[in-house]
Image (cartoon, rainbow, N blue to C red):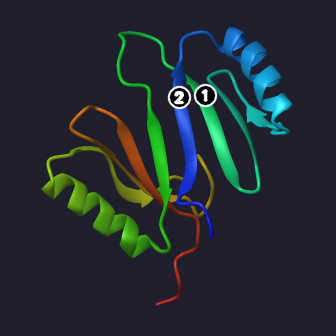
Amino acid sequence: MPSIFDHVTLGISDLMSARRFYDAVMGALGLPMLWSNDRMLTYGAGGEDFGLQLDAGAPRHGTHVAFRAPDRATVDRFHASALAAGGTDAGAPGLRPEYAVTYYAAFVRDPDGNRIEAVCHLPQPDA
């Protein structure tokens, strides 16, 4: 059965300390670093990612969970349903080419402030 998660991201306050720690623990689990930049570290395997993102400034909820969606219409429904159920908008449905060419996602915050995402990686089918 495929995983329901696309990726999970945790907020961090110090990139280098996090890298030292997670290089060791993820390495022990056989999960290599996939990529990094000046704000983020990403580990994983098999299409499932675990990310750490620099979360400078005022303390806030650093938890980010992304659920896989089978198509873009499901991402749209996720966003509308979350708002109707009391969530707050953190990013309307749409392409996020800064992540990947076909990365179609929507972001909401749950009532506790956690950032929840639905993402579809498939290209838009021809109309």
The quarter of the picture where the N terminus appears is bottom right
| Residue 45 pos. (x, y %) | 77, 49
Could you say which quadrant of the image residue 113 lies in?
Answer: top left
The image quadrant that residue 17 belongs to is: top right
Q: Can you give x and y, in whole percent of width and height, for residue 27 in the image?
A: 84, 30
Residue on which the image places disc 2: 10
Look at label 1 and name its amino acid.
Answer: Leu
Task: Give the spatial CA distance, label 2 vs label 1.
Answer: 5 Å
Number of numbered discs present? 2
Q: Nearer the viewer, residue 70 or 93?
A: 70
Looking at the rendered structure, which numbered label has been put on residue 123?
none
Side of 113 where 59 appears, left or right: right
Name which residue lies at 53% across and 28% down: 10
Q: Amino acid at mark 2?
A: Leu
In this view, which residue lies farthest toward the bottom?
127
Instruction: List x then y, in percent, for residue 81.
Output: 22, 62
Labelled pair 2, 1 in contact (Cβ < 8 Å):
yes
- Residue pointed to by mark 1: 52
